[in-house]
Image (cartoon, rainbow, N blue to C red):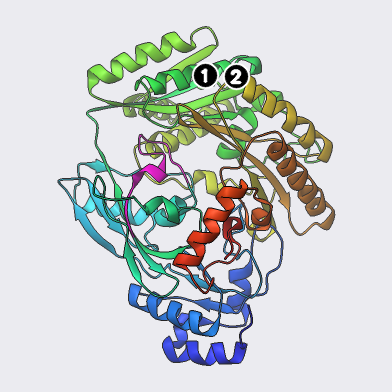
Amino acid sequence: MNYNQSTCRERLSALFRKDQLIFEGPDLSEVLENSYGIERQITGVVYPQSTKEVQDLVRLASELSLPLYPISRGMNQGYGDRLPVEDGQLIVDLQRMQAIRRYNPDGGIVTLEPGVTQKQLFDFLRSKQAPFWMDATGAGSASSIIGNTLEGGFGHTPLGNRRRQILDLEVVLGDGTLLNTGIFPSCGPNLSGLFVQSNFGIITAMSMSLMPVPSAFASYVIRVGESQQLGRLIEALGKLKQRGLIRSVPHVGNAVRTLMTTMDFATTWNSSEILTNEAAVKILSRPLLKVGPWNALGALYGSRAEVAESRACLRRAVRRMGNIDFFNDLKIGAILGLAAIPGLASVGLVKAVRRNAVALKELHLLMQGVPCNMPTDKIHWRVNRSQDLGLFWVAPTMTPAAEEIERLLSITSPLFKKHGFEMPITISLIEPFRAIGVFSIGFNKNIPAEKERARALYHELWEAVNNNGFEPYRCGVQSMSKIRYAPERAHALELIKAALDPAGIISPGRYGIKK
């Protein structure tokens, strides 16, 4: 787009206070820091504090042909952080819009602005002594609930498929018009889904569902003894989910993923060697808390009778492929108490048991809607300084069938070996008919050779999974131009973009959608 930068700065400065704008200097450099290690040229950053300010900004941008890139808080690690898809855009950071506008204690509905974090909603519900849990993800306590939801994010609870929890959106369209998509069932089409992973408007509020606190809760860990059993395990979990015996989102990770989520990189390990899954099993396994080549984490919710029935069915379903342990607050507390006994706490083996139990407790609480920083705190792993962190995520979707999962791993494993990286992977069962795999590529972005190897792996991995029919669930900013929509779908998206954002100023190129 063609626009006059000095005119834009002048007009923006007339519309916003000085402390709401960044055009240059170290603050701008900080905004542009990213885990990809790539550069973007941007016009600046603006921090609106109300829906009206967003409307005024959009009208001005339309007049000036100034492209905008809205973010909620910008914690999009592994997918581009705060970076826009293309150069020349003005980042619209909505983190100062932090109101929890409404809470309906009868219906279990809450209405949030984009800057509201997981911790803020959790603290709000606790202050109200609300009989509800929120869904929480491993994105960290400071991450935006709206931001994660609009990227198609998912959590762990029965509300884990966040696309399904959107009840109403307040959206500023490309001409400054304010749209409320409405709560359904109601008359006419439900428009809310149009604004997930798209660029048709700027979301300034969202109403979403909460979950009644169940009378019974138990988390579980399933250890698969052989990697060959992975596909059968996910198939079994899918069937239980289809029958309603599992309502949450089970996450199945390999031992490398489990280790990276729960432990810092140990200086005693040979940093030049790639950590294998077999080595990770040996490092992690301790008395009371064993780890397998693949480990499923999930939870059961409901009445005591419902949870008891689900426990029995789950145990029967997995008994020939692995071991299962169930946990409640008392059991985890007992393990932690045992590891804290004077005289034992300093013993190496007991310290390792305690470390595993602390990690399990964090995840146990996460499945009760308690935000957790452990996965984000450990994300650096091999990198000691946060400014060195390089991270790519590739997230293919699949049907939860054994042959599909085996085919995916047969494609991806050789590529990680070829380029010399560990392969941490989680497969999450979002719906009985749909699973998502998340592969991590971690590297030091300030070591040029390592960064190039990581980029080469990323691009080869992206092409391999896409060419073999595994469509991405989510996309990083550097790959959005590669998204391949069916021609008729691409045409429909272009028509919607032209109708809702006539000047094409909102996030040009996001998820491959252009006017």
Q: From the image, tell me which residue sits under label 2.
A: 402
| Camera-side residue of 142 and 313 | 313
Magenta part of the chain = 153-169
Is residue 496 on the magenta stretch? no
Please tell me which residue is depicted at 62% across the width and 39% down the height of the picture.
471
Please tell me which residue is depicted at 74% across the width and 36% down the height of the picture.
269
Residue at disc 1, secondary structure? helix
Confirm or deny contact between disc 2 and disc 1 (CB under 8 A). Answer: yes
Q: Residue 86 placed where, x, y %?
A: 65, 67
Q: Residue 333 placed where, x, y %?
A: 36, 29
Q: Is residue 155 left or right of residue 41?
A: left
Q: Residue 308 placed where, x, y %?
A: 29, 15
Check disc 2: other Cα within 10 Å, few if <14, some if 14-19, many if 20+: some
Is residue 165 on the magenta stretch? yes
Mark nearer the N terminus (2 vs 1): 1
Query: Considering only vertical position in the picture, is 384 above or below 436?
Result: below
Q: Check residue 321 in the rendering and tell me which mark sits there, or answer none.
A: none
| Camera-side residue of 18 and 291 | 18
Asked which quadrant contains residue 491, the reply is: bottom right
Query: Considering only vertical position in the picture, is 166 above or below 274?
Result: below
Label 1 sits on what residue type? Glu
Visible in this render: residue 181?
Answer: yes
Q: Is residue 235 left or right of residue 249?
A: right
Please tell me which residue is depicted at 55% across the width and 87% down the height of the picture.
8
Asked which quadrant contains residue 69, the reply is: bottom right
Q: Name the quadrant of the C terminus.
A: bottom right
Please tell me which residue is depicted at 51% across the width and 25% down the height of the picture.
296
Label 2 sits on what residue type? Ala
Query: Considering only vertical position in the picture, is 413 above or below 40?
Result: above
Q: From the image, tell me which residue sits under label 1.
A: 235
